[in-house]
Amino acid sequence: MKTILLIEDDPFLIDTYTLKLKEAGFSVEVATDGKQGLKKLAEKKFDLLILDIVLPQIDGWEILEKIKDLRFKIKELENLKIMVLSNLGQKEEVEKGIRLGAAKYLIKAYYTPSEVVEEIKKILTNDDNR
Ligand SMILES: [Mg+2]
């Protein structure tokens, strides 16, 4: 079973995505702020991170930078796929997310939860083919 960490602070989105992802057969853990998210990433190996950008304590940009720095030092992070799911949708923001290591950057307003789950399946399927 593929494991997903969702770092998100909006309770409605947490409920929605946790349910959707479990229905799709994924194991899901949630962190509601950046600090908690980084702690979970260091403790356990996940296949995919769904990352919000605007977060309490430590924001998504900082998390992306930390992962980029530590990817080859911490075994748990080596194969972690990252999907940014944010309201921030300026071109520069999307480019920054990709540059910092996100496999995909989705703007919340443009994707239904079902579409997001489809994108996640694509990311994790490509992973299997490698
Ligand atoms: Mg947020």
Image (spheres, rainbow, N blue to C red):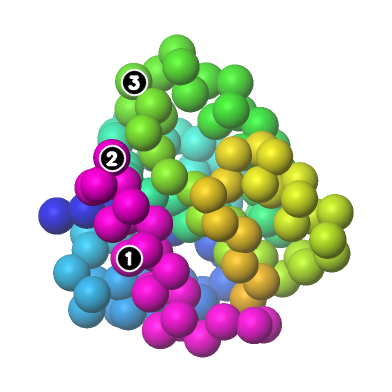
Looking at the image, residue 118 lies above or below residue 28 = below
Task: State the extent of the magenta-drawn residues as a range.
Answer: 109-130
> With 58 as the anchor, is 88 left or right in this view?
right
Instruction: From the viewer's side, name the closer residue of 4 and 111.
Output: 111
Looking at the image, residue 112 lies above or below residue 107 = below
Which of the image's four quarters has the C terminus? top left
Residue 117 covered by magenta stretch: yes
Instruction: From the viewer's side, name the closer residue of 52 and 101.
Output: 101
User: In the rendering, which numbered label is found on residue 25?
Assistant: none
Residue holding disc 3 = 75
Residue holding disc 1 = 121
The residues tagged by marks 1 and 2 sit, at their Cα atoms, a distance apart of: 15 Å
Residue holding disc 2 = 130
Residue 92 covered by magenta stretch: no
The amino acid beneath tag 2 is Arg
The residues tagged by marks 1 and 3 sit, at their Cα atoms, a distance apart of: 23 Å
The amino acid beneath tag 3 is Lys
> With 114 as the anchor, is 13 left or right in this view?
right
Confirm or deny contact between disc 1 and disc 3 (CB under 8 A).
no
Q: Which residue does the image show at 34% across and 20% down from the upper left?
A: 75
**Residue 30 point in image, percent of width and height:** 40, 57
Q: Quadrant of residue 117?
A: bottom left
In terms of secondary structure, where does tag 3 sit?
Answer: helix
Q: Which residue does the image show at 43% across and 45% down from the upper left?
A: 81
- The residue sitting at the front extreme is 129
- The residue sitting at the left extreme is 1
Q: Is residue 101 visible?
A: yes
Which of the image's four quarters has the N terminus? bottom left
> With 16 as the anchor, is 57 left or right in this view?
right
Instruction: From the viewer's side, name the closer residue of 88 and 6.
Output: 88
- Of label 3 and label 2, which has the lower sequence position? 3
Crowding at label 2, few (<14), some or many (≥20) Cα neighbours within 10 Å?
few
